[in-house]
Image (cartoon, coloured by chain):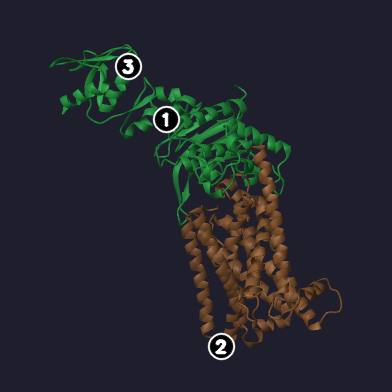
Chain colours: A green, B brown
Amino acid sequence: MSSRQTLLETKGLEVGYRSRRGKPVTIAGPISATIRSGQLICLLGPNGAGKSTLLRTLAGLQPSLGGAIHIMGDPSSAQRTPAALARKISLVLTDPVRYSNLTAYSLVALGRYPYSGWLGTLKEEDRRIIAWAMEVTGIGSYADRKIGMLSDGESQKVMLARALAQDTPLMMLDEPTAHLDLPSRIRIMQLLHKMARQTQKGILLSTHELDLALQVADELWLLQTGGRLDRGMPEDLVLNGTFESVFDKEGILFDKRTGSFNIHSGHLKKIGLAGKGVATFWTKRALQREGFEVTAAGQAAMDIRVEEGAAPVWLLDSSSGRQTFDSLSGLLDTLRNQFI
Amino acid sequence: MMQLRTNQRKRKTIQLAFLCLLLLAAFFLDIALGPVRIPLRSICRIVLSLPGEDSTWQYIVTQIRIPKTFTAVIAGCGLSVSGLQMQTLFRNPLAEPAVLGVTAGASLGVAAVMLAGGSITTLYTIRELGLSGSWLITVAGCTGAAAVMLLVILISRTVRDNIMMLIIGVMVGTVTLSIISIWQYFSDPELIKDYLMWTFGSLGGVTGAQLYILGLAAFVGLVISFLSSKMLDALLLGENYARSMGVTTQRARVIIICSTSLLAGSITAFCGPIGFIGIAVPQMARSLFATSNHRVLIPACCLIGTILMLLCDVIGQLPGSQAALPINIVTALVGAPTVIWMILRKNNLSIFG
């Protein structure tokens, strides 16, 4: 992968908007970053940090407030006409498209806009690429259905197919997995990951799916509320604590050992847990949700011992003796009563 | 699946053939009907320019009815297509020249010419002036239409909401009409009468050179519109997506303003403000042809718009009587229930449904 080509590079980029009186209001920056071919980059950050603004600025939909964006080495901004950009960057936005009354096929076919004839006529090559885009996104079965009749997940896949049909080296997606159910989210992320690998596209997407992003991204861009952008490999960012520092403020706790987030409820009550296996793992999750800080057995006033098996059994040791439970809900009921 | 598609195609062909037949019938009916009763046989002979017919009848058919029918064709095409373009640009099913004040703008242009110039420039004297006067009124109408369209677009850039957009259009139209009213209030009653007659709308009276000018303006507008059909398709997804596909949105707006004001402005200048065609026809075209592709929709709007306009004109003649209703009243009476029916049938007007 040493032949990875730089597709987009920013130097000291400042993004934001101009107020009514024309005064620039910077939301994020200065940002110096690169997108290389074959890379899947996830842009993460709290609401309002400026993820969409950054994406829109990189895509040329709104002007930057300072700094430079070089797309595929073009030195001058004269080359950044919409027509020239359309062959370099394709987009999936959050703008509503349901009302266009287009069929899934004609919507995907619009992706060929930069290449089709002056009346929008499609050549054999165009049809081949449209068919390919519909096949990899798995939307062939509803080609003739109107976009307004499709579910959120289906229509998002159609928009993704449209961007793929545009056949550009760079792809940018603004929250492509919002409003989708978990399987669809995972499928779209997997698909994008595969696309980056197979077609050597550089893909940048903004998302709130921290868990998924950690798993599929080659690189993370963490945009903080102050406008600072940290970037790096997901694992590096976790290990050096950057990841935690961005998200740890809002009452959630990032667990480095499991790579997942725990909701922390303020006052933590300690409880010991002993056991190995699936039932122990889920017991821990349930206890954390209840607001317990789970430690090794013997370090807290109370211990839970899980006996794994086809039907797990939970043993609770406390000052009032030993109690046995055959379900987690029974155990938690007792714990709740003792702590009120 | 294939079977389904062939069946669909067959149905489409039958539908198209039916519409073409309807067009021919409406076209012929519009020539055949009028306050003066002329036998069908004679009409056929006159249309085919066979000799030996009554010279009065010949005059009525060739100088009055045929120009009027062609005016109806031009108005039907032009108003429907300008409505279609505005609906796509504003992403709003209720946008049309009359709703968003473009017709009012054209009226202001016409009123400026008619009322400002004093007694020499009433609409009828302008018509007497021939070529130069017709140009004057066309330019005035188109300029007024373009000015309002520009204003609405400028305001709409800060407002993203569709409903807000409509309200702004209606308000701009209302302001424009009040300016005309102020003007009327201080004008000579004779001139006001002329202007009032014009606002009722009329397809008649556009003859000779005027018909050529109207035809030319509408033709140029339609050609611009058809050539921009690819761009209009992209605009269906909104300006951001359109831009990302290579549309220069500023240029797109200018092109659409040009062709819409040419179409709506020139037609309004000669025929008066005619409403509802621009709103009802694009909806019908979309649901009949089940597509959003402008390459299909623009000709479809021309076809359906022409049929509807001719039928409205036929109804307006009140067949069998000597009287005739102004076209503006008929299109409103036919158009408004059509829109209501379409909303009820769908139970919602899901923007482009």
Query: Could you say whether the residue bearing mark 3 is in a helix, strand or loop?
Result: helix
- Tell me the subunit letter for badge 3: A
Give above or below for A5 relative to A68.
above
Residue A171 picture quarter: top right
Label 1, on which residue? A210
Q: Is residue A149 left or right of residue B211?
A: left
Give above or below for B224 relative to A71.
below
- Camera-nearest label, 3 or 1: 3
Mark 2 residue crowding within 10 angstroms, few (<14) / some (14–19) / many (20+): few
Residue B318 picture quarter: bottom right
Q: In this view, does B31 lie to the left or right of A241?
A: right
Q: Where is residue A150 in the image (x, y as percent from the top left)?
A: 52, 41
- Tell me the subunit letter for badge 2: B
Label 2, on which residue? B189
Between residue B168 and residue B85, name the one nearer to us. B85
Can residue B90 be seen? yes
> How far apart, in angstroms, are the residues tagged by discs 3 and 1?
25 Å
Decide: marks 3, 2 in contact (CB < 8 A)?
no
> How far apart, in angstroms, are the residues tagged by discs 2 and 1?
74 Å
Mark 1 residue crowding within 10 angstroms, few (<14) / some (14–19) / many (20+): some
Q: Where is residue B192 in the image (x, y as percent from the top left)?
A: 57, 84
Query: Could you say whether the residue bearing mark 2 is in a helix, strand or loop?
Result: helix
Tally of numbered tags: 3
> How far apart, in angstroms, are the residues tagged by discs 3 and 2?
93 Å
Q: Type of residue at label 3?
A: Ala
Residue A169 picture quarter: top right
Label 3, on which residue? A279
